[in-house]
Image: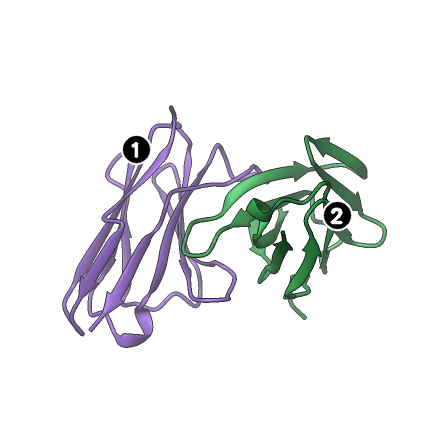
Amino acid sequence: QKEVEQNSGPLSVPEGAIASLNCTYSDRGSQSFFWYRQYSGKSPELIMSIYSNGDKEDGRFTAQLNKASQYVSLLIRDSQPSDSATYLCAVSTGNQFYFGTGTSLTVIP
Amino acid sequence: DAMVIQNPRYQVTQFGKPVTLSCSQTLNHNVMYWYQQKSSQAPKLLFHYYDKDFNNEADTPDNFQSRRPNTSFCFLDIRSPGLGDAAMYLCATSRDNGGREQFFGPGTRLTVL
């Protein structure tokens, strides 16, 4: 079982819609959770971090963490074509940092 | 602006010809990481340094070596690149080991001919 699992997609949403990206993780001891955005041919860019259960909002982005169910999600409101990218979920357990393989998002104008 | 810098951005080498990739940071972070990322795959951790303390991942091939001469710089040496080593190499930093965010440089795209 992989430490971090994401649906690879592709996920397509129309411009202005809400994009919902999900991630599950295997280690109940995981403490820190991150979402990175990666454009094709570029490096990952940190967009959200979350450490406690519940929601964390930053502009159009909301991260949601449920430790009991071992999932973390990212909502993108009012999706824009510029949001089209691969979104990587990352989970930290102690000194270990695990990435998922990413979900490809396409926002259709 | 504080940042992570990688040079070169694109590197072409020949099969078996040694290559060195460099990373520098102005964030004054204690931890520096090297990742390998191939198309449609997750970044794969090769090594990390906590200050001068070197940590090698168990499945990192011996062909890959790393040096961190000071806090700001870290190098990745590929002694005898094979075709399978063609990838994006990402350098990242974090303030410490305890679950902190990692910040990535722009990456070096390595092509092996």
* In this view, B8 is above or below B19: above
Secondary structure under tag 1 reads loop
Out of A104 and B12, give the one closest to the viewer: A104
Out of A73 and A82, give the one closest to the viewer: A82
Secondary structure under tag 2 reads loop
Q: Chain of mark 1?
A: B
The answer to which image quadrant residue B30 occupies is: top left
Toward the top, the furthest residue is: B1
On the image, numbered disc 2 is attached to which residue? A17
Identified at 77% across, 53% down, the residue is A71
User: Chain A takes which shade in the image?
Assistant: green
The amino acid type of the residue labelled 1 equals Ser
Identified at 43% across, 49% down, the residue is A43
Identified at 57% across, 52% down, the residue is A84
User: Chain B takes which shade in the image?
Assistant: purple
Q: Chain of mark 2?
A: A
